[in-house]
Structures are given as C-alpha cells and as structure tokens.
Amino acid sequence: MFKKVLITGLFASIALTIQAQESMTLENILTTIEKNNPGLKMYESEARAFNEAAKGAYSWMPPEGGAGLFMTPYNTKEIKADKMMMKEGMGYFMVSAQQMFPSRKKQDAEAAWMRSMSTVETEKRKVALNDLLYVAKKSYYEWLVLLKRQTVLDEGTRILDFMIKSAEIRYKNGLGKISAYYKAKAALANIDNMKLMLENELRQKRIMLNSLMYRNVQQEFSIDTLFTWKDFPVSILDSAYLKSRRSDIMALQRNMEVNNLQRNAELAKLKPEFGVRYDHMIGLSTQPSQFTIMAMVKLPLAKWSSKMNKAKAESLVWQNESLKSQQQMILNEATGMAGSARAELETKKKQMRLYETQIVPALQKNFQTMQLGYEQNTEELFELFDAWEALNMTQLEYLEQLKTALLMQAELEKILEIK
C-alpha cells in the first residue's frame, strides 16, 4: 500500500513539474485561443442556428379543417322529413378541408435570406477573434518585456551587492569613504521593491493568457522570449487592401447582402398563392350527400394589403445606404490609424537601434572602466554608482521603448487583421 502511494505521489510530482515547465510560443497561445475560447464558439453556434432555421423556409402552411352544421334551419322540426306533408327535411352536417400551396419563388427567397444571416455571424466571429488575439499579443509582449526587465534588475542586484560588500570591507580597513554606501543600499531596496511589483505583473499576464485560452487561470507555464519584427509596406495604407482584410467591414458587407435578400423575400410575398378547398356535406334527413371543391387564391398585391411589405422593402434600401456610410467611416478611420501606427513603429525601431548600437554599449563601457578603476583604487564608489545608475536607467528606458514598439506592432496587426 505504501509503495502504491509513493509511486502515485512520484508520478503526480513529475506531472506537476512537467506542467510547470511548459513553455508556449506566441503562435501556440494564439492557436489555443482560436480553438478553445467559448466566445468564438458562440458565433459558430449562431451561424449553425441560422443554417438550420433556413431549412424551415420550404415548409407549407398547415392544412385547415372544420366540421359543423350547414344550411340547417333554426326550427329543428323542419330538419326531419315528413312524407305526409311532402317535406324532404333540411340541413346538412359538413366536413371541410383546405390547403394553400406556397410560392416556390417566395420559399427560395426566404431560404436564401435566412442562410445569408449565418455569413454575418461568421464575419462577427472573425472580428471577435481579432480582438482576442490583440489582447493576447499585448499580454504576451508585456510579459516578454517584464522578463527582460527582470534580467536587468537581477544584474543590478548583483552589482549593488558587490558595491555594498566592497564598501564595507574598504571602510573597515580605512581605504574608502562611506558616502555612496547608503545610496547603494537604498538602490538595492528599491530594486527589491520593483521585483515585487514585477512578480505581481507577471502573475497577472499569466492569468490573462490562461483565461483567454480557457484554461485554469492558475496553471503555470512560461513563454518563449524570442520575437520577430514584421515589415509593413506602404501598400497597407491602400483603402482597397484594408477593405479586403477588415472583418468588421466585411460584416457590414454581409449585412447589406442580407438586407438585399430580405428585400427580395419581402417583394416575393406580394406574389399570389394558390390553394384548394373541399367540403363534404351529409344530409340530416333524406337530402343526398353533396360536395364542394374550389380553387383558392391569395392576392397580397392589392393596394390595401401590400403596404407593409413595400414599406419594409423600401426601409431595407435605406438601411444599406446607412451601412455603406458606416463602411466608409470605418475604412477612413482604419487608414488613418494604420498610417499613424506604422510611422510611430518605424520611429521606435530607429530609436531602439540607437540604444542598441550606441547608447547602451557606450554606457556599458563607461561602467566597466569605472569598475576596473574602482578595483584598482583609482576611482571612488560614488563614481562607480553613478555609472551603474546611468546604465541601469538607460537599459530600463530601452525596455520601455521596446514594449511600446511591440504593442504598436500588435495594434498594427489588429488594424490589418494579421495573426
């Protein structure tokens, strides 16, 4: 029994370790969101619902039936026949049935209209997916920058520990001043405080991504810190290009198609419909059985009965005009946002290249020179601290620029609906 418990615990421990070591790339996360997020499945179900409802467009009107007395006198004495008085009797018991036959053109128009509504839900799903992927990319890139910031802070902790311990030894031996010692101690405490805040932010990003992937929000996993810069040519600012990519614009286009098909369905209702009526009458006395069969026709085209359908058809024309204006408004806004985001992203990339090739390397060499001089007793602690502080602040500023650029890239991908 003890062996079983031990083996079970061992396997559970291994499973938890593997789970904790799970590493996910951005592509893995985005694919999982698209597959599992319940908000997207809602649109899939709505689209399926419209397709299923469209099957009912080819149903007929239910048959109508009735039974009762026909041409029966109020004076019930006259119902019976009277041979002495030469009376045959009066009244019938009638059974009737009626069936209208639907217009095939009307059914086709209604089926096409109902099926088209599923295409709107499909485009709405793409809009929702694009929003979810943007939130995921934003959280992913922020997490990535937080990890890089954590590396800078860890390096700062190591350097400050060296400064503090070295200053303590030198002060005891009367070889150094204590003036910068407390600045280093305060800086170290400040880094510890920043690390606490950073850990909290990391947890928040993990919870957000787990939530988007529809997983246990406390499930541990790590991310791949590699990322790629994407090129966005000037052609992305072309309105025709944007119109072909934006799901919200395509959703409006599908709405216009739905309105056109609904208008066809409304006008199809003005076409006549035919039917048949059959009545069978059984005499209550000596009257012979009789029947009536008649053709039926509905004429909805009459002026007093067609107003509602014509008004609805006209309103759909104006709804489409409104949707066209909305399309143009979204397209104009997206073009402006794409141009602005692209310009800002290019500027950020240039700034980061300056940080990477000139600013940070120069400050690193300055710190290394100061550290070497301090170890050789030619430089003071406060000079070494100032050199580290300048380097540390610049590295953190660079990471802020990196975060802004990555978020700008994510926003541009959202505008262009690029995964």
Image (cartoon, grey):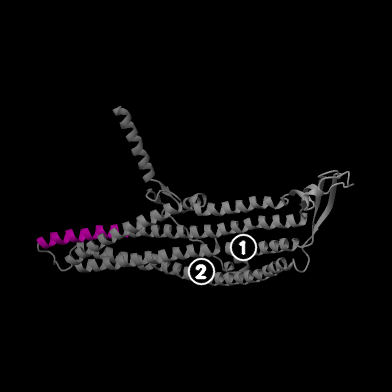
The percent position of residue 16, horizontal first and vertical second, equals: 36, 41
| Whether residue 295 is visible | yes
For the N terminus, give its image quadrant. top left
Q: Who's the residue at 57% across and 66% down the image? A: 236
| Whether residue 419 is visible | no
Left or right: 264 in relation to 391: right
Q: Kindly check if marks 1 and 2 are in contact, taking CB atoms under 8 A apart as contact.
A: no
Left or right: 97 in relation to 383: right
Q: Quadrant of residue 166?
A: bottom left
Residue receiving disc 2: 342
Indicate the amino acid at tag 1.
Met
N-term mark: 1 or 2? 1
Instruction: Give yes or no for residue 366 being in the magenta stretch.
Output: no
The percent position of residue 300, horizontal first and vertical second, equals: 77, 63
For this orientation, the residue located farthest to the top is 1
The percent position of residue 43, horizontal first and vertical second, equals: 56, 54
Magenta residues, start to end: 151-172
Instruction: Give yes or no for residue 170 being in the magenta stretch.
Output: yes
Residue receiving disc 1: 250
The local secondary structure at tag 2 comes to helix
Give the Cα distance between marks 1 and 2: 23 Å
Instruction: Determine crowd level at label 1: few under 14, some 14-19, many 20+ residues with C-alpha closer than 10 A.
Output: many
Magenta stretch: dominant secondary structure: helix
Q: Quadrant of residue 360?
A: bottom left
Left or right: 217 in relation to 162: right
The local secondary structure at tag 1 comes to helix
The percent position of residue 350, horizontal first and vertical second, equals: 45, 69
